[in-house]
Image: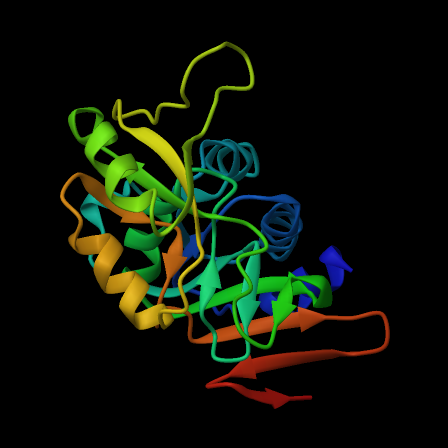
Amino acid sequence: MKKRCAAIAFKKIHPHMVIGLGGGSTIGFLVDMIKEAQLDIQIVTPSEKTKQHCLEAGLTVLDPSFVATIDLAFDGCDEVDQDLQVLKSMGGIHTEEKIIAKMAKEYIVLVDESKVSSTLSFRVPITLEVVREALTSVLSNLSAKGDVTPRMSQTSDAYTFTSRGTILVEFTPNDKHSLKEWNTYLLMLPGIVDTSLFYNIATRAIVVTKASDYELTGGRKHV
């Protein structure tokens, strides 16, 4: 199914485009298809694994800091709803991913049907990138509004830090605020760099199912 999803995405890519690519196995299939077709394109990616895969495939990879506009960006996600609101929580590089997503003229998420909800259910928490000095303050502010905890390292008894030295915090809301309200509140809370809630950013979702495939765009399904 992942390879089929990548094949649908591949059809949207044309020569001389600048393409944003996230991480994951579906993106890996897409990289292989670009290599096989020998497409003359340039790649921007926040994922070190995807970057290495592209370089090994002989593709041109640009430093994001020198790019202002991207034609298309493709990425996976943990959950997407019918209004194209997206959660990208588990990877921990959502700040970099969001920068690339917002540079793209079109940001397309690639998923199977298990990732699609009518509205975001927070089956995975919102991941927050928090500066160290604000950790206690952020935890205190959010503790009455849901379940909040720093993400622990998988290799040691310590918090999970980003390459910038910031800390990843996982938050599951228990209030019934709208996604717009949560997005605004979290981004305005001092010390939060960014969140894994991609609110009004995705323009399309390619969804593969066992029976058929479809696209979500503007909350409408197109077979």
Image coords of residue 219 (percent x, y): 51, 85
Quarter containing the N terminus: bottom right
Q: Which image quadrant: the C terminus?
A: bottom right
Residue 43 percent across, percent down from the top left: 41, 50
Q: Residue furthest front?
A: 144
Q: Residue at x 78, y 71 (%)?
A: 209
Q: Quadrant of residue 112?
A: bottom right
* Residue in the picture at 51% in, 68% down: 13
Tell me residue 111's x, y (percent): 64, 62
The number of numbered badges drawn on the structure is: 0
Asked if 34 appears above or below 52 in the picture, the reply is below
The residue shown at (33%, 54%) is 98
Please, which residue is most extreme toward the top here?
Answer: 156
Horizontal arrangement in the rendering, residue 99 relative to residue 12 (left or right): left
In the depicted structure, whether residue 41 falls above or below residue 191: below
The correct choice, above or below, for 89 with respect to 80 in the image is: above
